[in-house]
Image: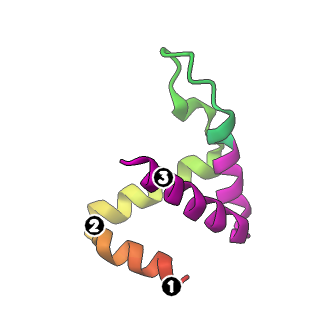
Amino acid sequence: MSAAEVKETKTDLIAWIKQLSDISMLSMLESLKNADTGDIGKDWWDDLSPAQKENINAGLREAESGNVMSSKEFWAKLKDA
């Protein structure tokens, strides 16, 4: 990724974060920002809330049942949101 692409990506992410109103998404992003990446042996799963774990498990169940969309469809829907 070029320096210009990095700058554009950062700008796009900042704009997206500014418009977010989903508290769980904001909380997840904050957790990601505050994550201690120095503890190699620690499993990130252990730091998730029960609700976050259930959301992940629900997504896995949906994927296993074939309820999925392509990356192209995902990004198109996200852009329109």
Q: Earlier in the sequence, mark 2 or mark 1?
A: 2
Callout 3: helix, strand or loop?
A: helix
- Measure how far apart labels 2 and 1 are at the Cα level: 26 Å
Task: Provide the residue designation for mark 2.
Answer: 65
- State which quadrant residue 34 falls in: top right
Q: Amino acid at mark 1?
A: Asp
Is residue 24 placed above or below 40 in the rendered structure? below
Callout 1: helix, strand or loop?
A: helix
Q: Amino acid at mark 2?
A: Ser
Which region is colored magenta?
A: 1-30
Q: Amino acid at mark 3?
A: Ile
Q: Earlier in the sequence, mark 1 or mark 3?
A: 3
Callout 2: helix, strand or loop?
A: loop
Task: Provide the residue designation for mark 1.
Answer: 80
- Frontmost of labels 2 and 1 is 1
Total labels: the figure holds 3
Q: Residue furthest bottom?
A: 80
Going 59% across and 50% down the picture, which residue do you hit?
A: 52
- Measure how far apart labels 3 and 2 are at the Cα level: 14 Å
Nearer to me, 53 or 75? 75
